[in-house]
Amino acid sequence: MATVKTAKAQSHAVNLRVREEVRALIDRAARSRGTSRSDFMIDAARRAAEEALLDQCLVQVDAASFDHFAAVLDAPPASPGFQRLMQAKTPWQA
């Protein structure tokens, strides 16, 4: 029978210095999720890192597609619904 070797996941320490009120807030949030402070912070940092990287999306298109895209962005909206929306009073102006 063949044996399968699995790579052992290595973990590395990351030290952070935070103000007492921030630590208390993190501890409170971690308790509300039923997790440790470390696990809560790792999960929050991972989600923030993924979001930051996803925000930097590169889309490559040919010149004709880009010209069409730029023309659409440069053209002012002309529908009656848009005009009505722009003329509506905002709640703080009422």
Image (spheres, grey):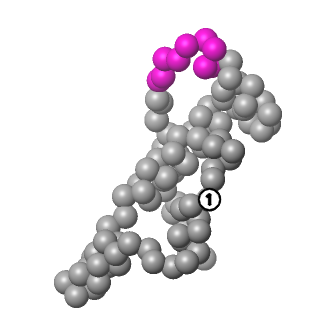
Residue under the image location 62 percent in, 31 percent down: 38
Q: Looking at the picture, does residue 16 appear above or below residue 67?
A: above
Q: What amino acid is found at the position of numbered circle 1 in the picture?
A: Ala
Q: Residues within 10 Å of mark 1 (few under 14, many from 20)?
A: few
Along the viewing direction, whichever of 56 and 6 lies nearer the viewer: 56
Along the viewing direction, whichever of 70 and 89 lies nearer the viewer: 89
Q: Position of residue 75 (x, y in %)?
A: 34, 75
Q: Is residue 68 rendered magenta in the image?
A: no
Q: Looking at the picture, does residue 38 appear above or below residue 72?
A: above
Total marks shown come to: 1
Q: Which residue is mark 1?
A: 88
Q: Position of residue 89 (x, y in %)?
A: 63, 53
Q: Looking at the picture, does residue 91 appear above or below residue 27?
A: below
Residue under the image location 54 percent in, 62 percent down: 86
Q: Is residue 22 rendered magenta in the image?
A: yes
Q: Is residue 25 left or right of residue 51?
A: right
* Residue 3 appears in view: no
The image quadrant of residue 31 is: top right
Q: Position of residue 21 (x, y in %)?
A: 63, 14
Magenta span: 15-23
Q: Looking at the picture, does residue 93 appear above or below residue 7?
A: above
Q: Residue furthest top?
A: 20
Q: Position of residue 45 (x, y in %)?
A: 53, 40
Q: Is residue 14 left or right of residue 3?
A: left
* Residue 71 appears in view: yes
Residue under the image location 68 percent in, 18 percent down: 24
Along the viewing direction, whichever of 72 and 76 lies nearer the viewer: 76
Residue under the image location 44 percent in, 59 percent down: 54
